[in-house]
Amino acid sequence: MPPPPPGMPDVPPLPGARLTAGGAEFCVYAGHATGVEVCLFDRDATGHETERRVPLGHRAHGMWFDVVPGVGAGQRYAFRATGPWDPGRAQRYNDAKLLLDPYARAIEGDVTLDPALFAHHVGPDLTGDLTVPDGRNSAAYLPRCVVVDDAFDWGDDHPPRRSLTDSVLYEVHVKNATALHPGIPERLRGTYAGLAHPAFIEHLSGLGVTAVELLPVHAFTHEPELVVRGLTNHWGYNTLGFFAPHAGYAATDDPQGVVDEFKGMVKLLHAAGIEVILDVVYNHTAEQSQDRMTLSWRGLDARAYYRLDARGQDIDVTGCGNTLDLTHPIVVAMVLDSLRYWVEECHVDGFRFDLAVALARGRDDAYDPTHPFLVALRADPVLSRVKLIAEPWDVGLHGWRTGQFPPPFSEWNDRFRDSVRTFWLRDLAASSAGETGHGVRDLATRLAGSQDLFGVRDRGTIASINFVTAHDGFTLADLTAYDVKHNEANGQGGADGSGDNRSWNHGVEGPTDDDTVGATRRRSMRNLMGTLLLSSGVPMINAGDEVGRTQRGNNNPYCQDNEISWTSWELEPWQGDLLETVRHLVALRRQHPVLRQRRFFSGRQVHRDGSTDLAWFGGDGQEMGRRWDGPAVDTLQALFNGSVVGHESVLLSLNGSAWLAEVTLPTAPGAAAYELLWDSAEERPGPRGPRLAAGSEVTMAASSMRVWRAVDPS
């Protein structure tokens, strides 16, 4: 390594490519490299691409940087790095391989699978000797980074800043949502612009959702094994760039336009009062394990970016071949810089962290809630003010950590999902067969906000992101139509996807013309959705569930960019009824603050009339008492006392059995009578029912749920 030139800066600039007066400054981390070049791509007079390599002349703290005159917005570029070839130490520097900038704010083109993309020599079958470097130039097969201008006319845009207590989240895939939407121009379907089109915003607003939680929109590519099978990574959990919006979701082909289209989507959603939350994948990258392609980080400094064992092998707690090393300051800085970029430059409102446990494993591999990365997030003046949601597990040892993230994190509550599915589906199947179920204790805990999981450190009910379905798993409709997964289209022999679905097909596997089966399936959908939207915590709807979207029994369509995944908007009458039901339930939640309060219920007296903030009753109208643990108990009533929030009280009555149930409305202080607000036995919400005095006996349909407004005698 030659000595540093005179006047070399002591502190490197921020990584990435930034426009300066008369040029652009490039900076990239490659701590073990002996040299780094920025490669500038242009077109000659004949239209052929040319490559000009410019050595980065400055180095400090492992950062390589320099100013290149004459570079402007729109410049295509990438890097090449030289250094030791020492596979035993995970060093495979190879300047024949073009490398993407980890900080690129726009990426143009796709990865084209070819043996030249591998730093080590491989044959046509993409296997080879990890110790032998490959001399083929990968430039023809790798996308280009693009220098962009960050300027954008945000007008009077401001974040909606919705309280989590008032939030209803909508997990949605950019393409799936509008690929088939007849109200959106064809050229905009499946794009950022399509998601922000008035026709789709009208749907979101009419539904009552307050935030969209977008499946990954960071630039991504496809795993070689999928490409070989003729499939793609449709969900996007295979990141190619943490700062660039995925160009495939844009209506425009221009890289600057892609960035601007994403920002325009955020601006329009904000104008409708809808927040934008990004599902972010900082646990691994698209490079997979070290016997796979070299696209960026691995060619720059695998020892810094990835978790490795003593032999230089990848430590994989993600199931994707590698794990980013969040104990390394360069990686922590990259992730924090990425998060801030999306908040400050793109105005997003929060993040859902995929496999978040992988981000908080220390050098001893154990999950640590005081991990430096989590501390940095919680202390950051920008990031600590946006919504932070953890997927509280990974696939490593002791990876399930629901309830163990520190505030202000909220968490996907898989216990809620499992308990609600068990009560309304598996226990219903048991009841139909004359068997007993699991009782109501755990269901009651989920209805009340899951205090057993989130009751410490003043986290409150908003720490629980409640869901019954999500992108991975059955849809709401498929939960009621399939006992087992049908993933044959994925080409993995049915080995992929979870086998623990807690679903019930109601006696027939898949589609059926049986009217009775169809009716009971639809009632089960309404029960699941009603429980989701009326429980304490923050509800998350899986996009398309509101119209009964099916994936034909595929519970892992991560590689299905087709009508298996796309939402159809040609609705049958029952789907229109379900949509109206979901709208009605969201409205009930909004109208009754007691259903969305932040604090947990104590069960203690809160009013001088003797009423408690939450009271539990059996189907006979009597307090549950010692009946909680009986497996034969399948009827439950919960009275949420609205006086604690200065509003009306609400009674939920649930009959989980396969038979009609005679239910007595409970007599309790502050509840002299009840007015019916919703009955899941009805296909479509009807007018409010008559007032019934406390102590009245009502007949509830098999497997049904009712919502009542308690009437105070005063």
Image: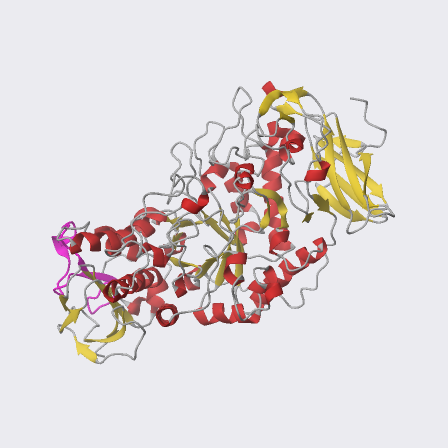
Image quadrant holding the C terminus, namely bottom left
Q: Is residue 449 magenta?
A: no
- Where is 659 relative to 14, above or below? below
**Residue 382 visible to the viewer:** yes
Rendered location of residue 407, percent (x, y): 44, 48
Answer left or right for 502 relative to 697: right
In the image, residue 625 lies in the stretch drawn in magenta: yes
Q: Main secondary structure of the magenta part?
A: loop
Front-most of residues 595 and 429: 429
Give the position of the N terminus as an image quadrant: top right
The image position of residue 86, as x and y in percent, is 64, 19
- Image point 61% across, 39% down: which residue? 333
Residue closer to the observer: 551 or 199: 551
Residue 402, horizontal then vertical, whole percent: 37, 44
Q: Is residue 199 above or below residue 503?
A: below
Q: Quadrant of residue 262?
A: bottom right
Q: Is residue 618 left or right of residue 708?
A: left
Residue under the image location 68 percent in, 43 percent down: 143
Q: Is 126 displayed left or right of 103 in the figure? A: left
| Colouring scheme applied when the structure was drawn | secondary structure
For the point 67% across and 59% down, the residue is 252
Bounds of the magenta segment:
606-635
* In-image side of 372 versus 596 (left or right): right
x, y (%) of residue 47?
82, 48
